[in-house]
Image (tube, grey):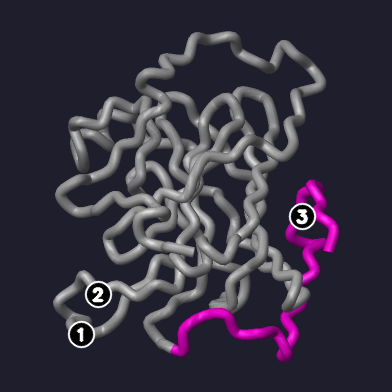
């Protein structure tokens, strides 16, 4: 299947799941359908326009539900700080659903893992396409079982089935796997395509404090951070 960087509008999406698709996930009811989410700086905001996964072996495309919460009006930062984490300064990428959320797939959702994930997003008038090949190492990390962190599911497994993209204002994207109160850092990706606005006046020339923006904030009391190379040896 050739890679395409054209945005898939909802009414034109081909959603084709074949019954003969090879299962590449654990036979465990605790293994949930995968999702695509985003981690976005409050101050240097990015808008996700479309996100989907593609399976070459299964011949299907699965689109996430609309990212309206990321593109609509946002509460004042002081309200977020007052009701959640007062130490968050608004600049760094925040790995938390205070500012961001992870929508579900259209339909019932696939547990079979995609071969590629695509995210189309915008920052400061410029559109970016981020494309990630879901390598055997990434799939191994997603299907790795962990003890479930909740006492309600003691003795049961938990999995990291969420792809979380940290979107930087220069078009780069960081990727984590999330689940089980753990973030597994996968790596940083350059944009597969950059589409500047037709009118350059739409770009606001403002300084970016990279020493703050290129940092990551997460709740260290609740979540653990790890690197994919430390948990998967292939």
For residue 148, the mark is 2
Range drawn in magenta: 1-27
SS at badge 2: loop
Q: Position of residue 67 (x, y in %)?
A: 56, 51
Pointer 1: what residue? Answer: 155
Q: Residues within 10 Å of mark 3 (few under 14, many from 20)?
A: few
Structural distance between the alpha carbons of marks 2 and 3: 37 Å
Q: Residue at x 49, y 9 (%)?
A: 207
User: Disc 2, disc 1: CB below 8 Å?
Assistant: yes
As rendered, which of 18 and 175 lies closer to the eye? Answer: 175
First in residue order: circle 2 vs circle 1: 2
- Assign a secondary structure to mark 3: loop
Query: Distance of mark 1 from mark 3, alpha carbons?
Result: 42 Å
In the displayed structure, would residue 59 be above or below residue 201?
Answer: below
- The majority secondary structure of the magenta stretch comes to loop
Residue carrying label 3 = 9
Q: Nearer the viewer, residue 14 or 58?
A: 58
118 lies left or right of 231: right
Q: Residue 69: image x %, image y %?
A: 49, 47
Q: Locate the N terminus and report the quarter of the image it occupies.
A: bottom right
Of marks 2 and 3, which one's residue comes earlier in the chain? Answer: 3
Residue drawn at (72%, 11%) of the image: 201
- Vertical placement of 77 versus 212: above or below? below
Residue 69 inside the magenta-drawn segment: no
Q: Could you say where residue 83 lies in the image, as x and y percent from the top left?
A: 20, 41
Q: Is residue 23 magenta?
A: yes
N-terminal of the pair, mark 1 or mark 3, is 3
């Amino acid at each position: 299947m050739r890679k395409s960087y054209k945005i898939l509008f909802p009414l034109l999406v081909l959603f084709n799941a074949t019954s003969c698709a090879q299962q590449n996930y654990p036979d465990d009811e605790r293994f949930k359908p995968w999702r695509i989410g985003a981690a976005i700086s409050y101050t240097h905001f990015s808008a996700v326009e479309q996100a989907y996964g593609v399976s070459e072996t299964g011949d299907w495309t699965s689109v996430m539900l609309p990212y309206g919460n990321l593109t609509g009006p946002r509460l004042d930062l002081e309200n977020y700080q007052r009701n959640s984490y007062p130490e968050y300064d608004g600049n760094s990428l925040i790995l938390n659903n205070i500012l961001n959320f992870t929508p579900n797939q259209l339909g019932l959702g696939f547990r079979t893992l995609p071969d590629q994930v695509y995210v189309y997003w915008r920052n400061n008038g410029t559109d970016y396409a981020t494309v990630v090949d879901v390598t055997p190492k990434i799939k191994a990390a997603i299907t790795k079982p962990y003890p479930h962190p909740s006492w309600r599911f003691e003795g049961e497994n938990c999995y990291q089935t969420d792809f979380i993209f940290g979107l930087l204002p220069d078009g780069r994207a960081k990727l984590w796997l999330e689940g089980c109160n753990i973030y597994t850092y996968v790596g940083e990706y350059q944009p597969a395509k950059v589409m500047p606005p037709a009118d350059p006046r739409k770009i606001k020339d403002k300084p970016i404090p990279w020493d703050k923006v290129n940092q990551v904030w997460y709740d260290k009391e609740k979540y653990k951070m790890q690197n994919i190379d430390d948990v998967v040896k292939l």
